[in-house]
Amino acid sequence: MKILTDGLSSVDGFLYLGKHVGIKRQKKDLGILYCEKVCSAAAVYTKNQIKGASLYVTKDHLENGQAQAVVVNSGVANVATGQQGIKNAELLAEAVAKELNIQAADVLVASTGVIGPQLPMDKITAGIKGTKAELSKTGDFAEAIMTTDTFKKEICVEHENFRIAATAKGSGMLAPNMATMLAFVVTDAEVPADELNAMLKVSVNKSLNMLSIDMDTSTSDTVMILSSGTAKDVKPERFQEALDKVCVEITKMLAVDGEGATKLIISQTVNAASPADAKKVAKSIVNSNLVKCAVFGNDPNWGRIMMALGNSQAETLVEDKIKVWINDKPIVDGGKAADGFDEPQLTEILKNNKEIYIKIDLGLGESEATAYGCDMTYDYIKINAEYTT
């Protein structure tokens, strides 16, 4: 398996664009992803009970397991907008379909941004006109979907005879299940829609659903995958491996770009009594505001990790079996401070590393899980205190 450097443009058959149409003051705010043929397609969505209008339209359009284009706007989330919001999402799909000369039912829709306002349809539909001629292999789709993100997130993996690429946005309101996160995956592998759907769920459950920035699950989260099918005879197990890799790497990019973040936190639980317990413990570490603040402040207070472990609601925990390492340095052994534990040394580890790896051995079984998050900084509060102002 090889990671390529060109992101979305590495997968043949797909064209993109990113442009400014006036939803935001200056930054790109409309993205279109287009395949030269109808694709098999699948998606997974937020568990928030308040959902964006775009999700309802996309779910409806994906009932037949196919799509040919995706249109995304940033700046306005099209959430809590009633029937007018649904109508606007449908009009958005129709406008793109007309421009690209494809079926409206083959256009998937996503929106991200501020909750409440209606989409400025006059600006968006005017901006869509002429976009067919603007599509290219390198069109800046990844930039157009960003909100408070500080960098574009793209990756492409080549595995045997096929490629999978992905882009995503999201840096706040991020917590399982999924986050204020949109992710778009394209592949040339020939995979039927039902298999795409099943494999996407597997990958998301071990990656994007193990991501947390602030424990707030967004209303708009969507992960879509489109398969052009030009690469034949793809082995399902190889495709799953590559999709897992793409989703995990995108998850890390989202975590490290959490609003105001300075450090990536990777929490791994091993030897748990059950898969459910492994997930609960790993998530509890990245969800803990006290752990996140300690990592930001280079505070060697490992008691906060023990607190988060005990607060995980894991069914089986035995305190005197617990071991903890931070960046391979033993911190806890048998539920108490490890022999030779040195607070100043841990402070230096926290201070000198941008990636903090917390490993927890529960000593009770063979299950494991990994979760991804970031530290919590002063800037997180500033960004979210001033989000609409």
Image (cartoon, rainbow, N blue to C red):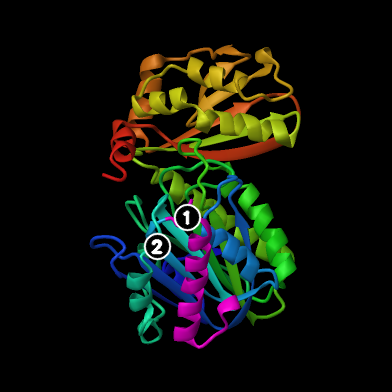
Q: Could you say which quadrant of the image residue 260 lies in?
A: top left
Q: Could you say which quadrant of the image residue 344 lies in?
A: top left
Q: Residue at x 50, y 27 (%)?
A: 288
- Residue 272: % across, % down: 71, 29
Q: Quick check: marks 1 and 2 in contact, CB under 8 Å? A: yes
**The disc labelled 2 sits on which kind of residue?**
Leu
| Residue 164 seen by the camera | no
Q: Residue at x 50, y 78 (%)?
A: 94
Read off the magenta span: 77-105
- Furthest residue toward left: 26
Residue 42: in magenta span: no
Q: What is the chief secondary structure element of the magenta stretch?
A: helix
Residue 164 versus residue 388: which sits nearer the camera?
Answer: 388
Q: For mark 1, what is the residue?
A: 81
Residue 271 versus residue 66: which sits nearer the camera?
Answer: 66
**Label 2 packing within 10 angstroms: few (<14), some (14-19), many (20+):** many
- Residue 92: % across, % down: 46, 72
**The disc labelled 1 sits on which kind of residue?**
Thr
Residue 222 versus residue 118: which sits nearer the camera?
Answer: 118
Q: Residue at x 45, y 42 (%)?
A: 173
Q: Which mark is residue 119?
A: 2
Local secondary structure at mark 2:
loop
- Residue 274: % across, % down: 75, 32
